[in-house]
Image: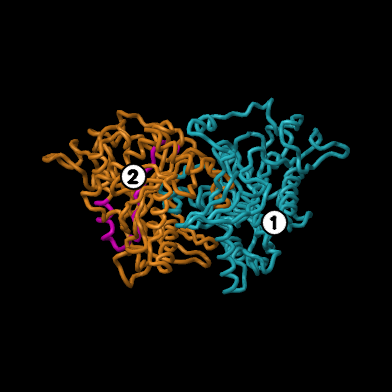
Chain colours: A cyan, B orange
Amino acid sequence: MSELRKCPITDRWVIISPTRGRRPSDFEAVSAEKTDNAKCPFCEGNESKTPAEIIAWRKPNTLPNTPGWQVRIIPNKFPALGIEGEVNRRGIGIFDMMSGVGAHEVIIETPRHNESLADMTEADIDKVLWAYKHRIQDLQKDSRFRYILVFKNYGKAAGASLEHPHSQLIATPITPRYVKLELSNSRAYFQEKERCIFCDLMRQELSSGERIVYENELFVAFAPFASRFPFETWILPRRHHSDFQGTPDDERMQLAGCLKDVLTRLKVTLNDPPYNYVVHTAPNSITRPGKPDYWGTIEYDYHWHIEIIPRLTKMAGFEWGSGLYINPTSPEEAAKYLRESI
Amino acid sequence: MSELRKCPITDRWVIISPTRGRRPSDFEAVSAEKTDNAKCPFCEGNESKTPAEIIAWRKPNTLPNTPGWQVRIIPNKFPALGIEGEVNRRGIGIFDMMSGVGAHEVIIETPRHNESLADMTEADIDKVLWAYKHRIQDLQKDSRFRYILVFKNYGKAAGASLEHPHSQLIATPITPRYVKLELSNSRAYFQEKERCIFCDLMRQELSSGERIVYENELFVAFAPFASRFPFETWILPRRHHSDFQGTPDDERMQLAGCLKDVLTRLKVTLNDPPYNYVVHTAPNSITRPGKPDYWGTIEYDYHWHIEIIPRLTKMAGFEWGSGLYINPTSPEEAAKYLRESI
C-alpha cells in the first residue's frame, strides 16, 4: 500500500510506493528494460494484456477491450497510488502522512506502435486531448482528489518504460507543490493588480516576439524568459481560462495544431529528443467553496498551460541541492532555432 | 556572459549560461563524451592542463601547479557564473534579472584517477572536507555572494563530465530556493518552539532507529522519513551547528569516517551507483545584520547537513510537473539494506 509522507523540514510531500517496490538488485535490470514490439500490451490486438479499459474512442459497433479504437484509457498496471480506500491523515511525532489514495491511468494515444504524437494528424491529437478532458472531468467528481495531473514521458531518458506512445494521469489527495506555487503566486498578483499574471506575461512575450515559437488564432507557444531547460516551451491559450478541461471542443483542434507544430519543431531541431510535458490546470477544489484547499478566485487568477521539457541535459548535484537550474541555451536562441526549423 | 533570471510565475531563479552554450547539434555529442585517462586534466602530472590552482593540500617544498598535492582546487574551466563584475539587478517589464556573477570551482579530491571517495582513507577524505571549509570561508568574505553550495556529481548518470574524482562549488548572488525553503521553515519552527527542527527530527530518528544507517560519537546518517529517492541518505552533526565550515578540525575526522562509511554502504549495496551529494550550510548573510537577505536567528534555527542522492530512478513528467516525488523503496527498507551491507 502506498503512503504519502511530508518532509517536516521542507513541507515537501513524497509518494512512498513500495507496490512498485524495488530491491537494490532491481534497479539496474529496470534501466535496461526494452520493449518487444510484438508483445507490446498497448498495440491494437493485444488489448487482453492490459487491465480492462476505462473508456476508449472507438469505431461504431466495436466492443471494449477489442480492436477498433483510436485512443484507449486503462488503469496503470503498477499504480503509484491506489484507487481504493479513504484519505486517512495521521501523524507520528514530527511526521505527517496520509494514505496513498489516488488514481493512476494510462492514455494510449494511438493503436500504432511507431506513430509518435508529432506524426499524428491534428484530428487524432484532438482525440488524445479529448481523453485528457474526459478523464479529468470524471475524476474531479471524486471528492478524495484535490488535483489531476496529466503528463507525458517520451523516450527512455524521459522516464518512459514502454515505447508505445502514451500519456498518463495521476489524481492526488493533495495539490502538488509546483502547482500550488503557481496558484498562490498568481493569486497574489491578481489581488494586487486585478490582472492575470499569465495574461500579462503572454502580452509581453507577444509584443517582444523574441521568444515566440508558434502562434495561431487561439494559442501561443513560447520559450519562457526563465527557461529551466534548453528548448523548454510553454503553450498557453490566448483567452484567459483557468482550466484545461473547460476548453470548448471546437477550440481544442487549434490546440492540437499548436501541439503538433511545437512537437514537430522540437523533433526536427533536436533530432527526436526525449521529452516530458505536463498540463497545468486549476485544482479540483475550484468548485468547493468552504472546503479545505479551496482556491477562491482561481478562475480569475490562474491560467492553464502546457509545459514541454526536452530532456537534453542531466540534473546534477547543484540543481538537486539548490533548486537553481543552469541552462546552457538562452530561450531567445532556442526560440529562434525552433521558429526557423520548419 | 551569464545572467540570472527570475520566473515571474514561480519566483524561481535560473542561470542562463550561454558561455557553456550549446547549439542543437551539440547535445548528443556531449552525452557521449568519454574521459581518456592519459589525458585527464585532473591527474597528477597534468596540472598544466587546468586553470592555475587556487590552493592545494601539498607536500612540503612542492610548487603550485606541479605534482605533490593531495587535494587541489581550481577554477572551473567552463564556469556557470563569472567571477568578474558587480551584481547588477534590473528589470524588463514583468521580468527580473541580475548579472551572472559568482564563483565556480572544482575540488580535485585525489591525484589518483581511479580512487573513489569511498575507497580513500579517512585522513584523505578529511583533506577534501578541509578544502570545502577553506573555500567556503574564503568566498564568504566576498560580499557579492549570498551562498556557497558545495556538491559532488559521481558517475555520468549523476552529471559528472569527467571521471576523475572531484567535487565542485558554486557561489551565487542569491540564496538558492531549496536552501531558502529550509531556512524559512526551520526559522518558523524555532520561533514557535524555541527548538531546532533538525535536532527534533534527529532525536526522533535516533529513538525509533528504523531509518538509521550509521552513527558515531558526533555524526548520524539516516534515510529521511520522506525520502524523495530510493536510498537517499542524510548526514547530520549530533551537536547543533548552523554552518558546516564551523566544524572544528578535530571533529571533522569523524565526519570523514561517517561519509566514508555511508558511501561504502551505498557502493556495496547498489553496485557502485551514480550519486550526487550536496552540503547544506547556513547562508553567508548569517554575519551581516541589517543587510538584505539577513537570516536573523539562523545560528539557532538552522542545522547544517549533507544530503546524498543515489541516482537510481529517472525523473519523469509527473515529478517535473508536480514537484511530488514517487519513491519505490521505503526509507525503512533502504536503511535496513544499508545497515546490513557491511
Q: Quadrant of residue A219?
A: bottom right
Mark 1–mark 2 Cα distance, whole angstroms, equals: 50 Å
Q: Is residue A112 above or below residue B200?
A: above
Q: Does residue A335 appear anywhere in the picture? A: no
**In this view, which residue lies farthest toward the right?**
A61
Secondary structure state at the residue bearing disc 2: strand
**On the image, numbered disc 2 is attached to which residue?**
B215
- Report the disc number at residue B31: none
Quadrant that contains the N terminus of chain B: bottom left
- Where's residue A131, x and y in %? 74, 47
**Mark 1 crowdedness (10 Å alpha carbons): few <14, some 14-19, many ≥20:** many
Q: Does residue A218 appear anywhere in the picture? A: yes
- Where's residue A80, x and y in %? 61, 44
* Foreground of the two, B201 or A307: B201
The residues colored magenta run B133-157
Chain for numbered disc 1 = A
**On the image, numbered disc 1 is attached to which residue?**
A244
- What amino acid is labelled 1 in the image? Phe
In magenta segment, residue B151: yes
- What amino acid is labelled 2 in the image? Glu
Q: Quadrant of residue A125?
A: top right
Chain for numbered disc 2 = B
In magenta segment, residue A26: no
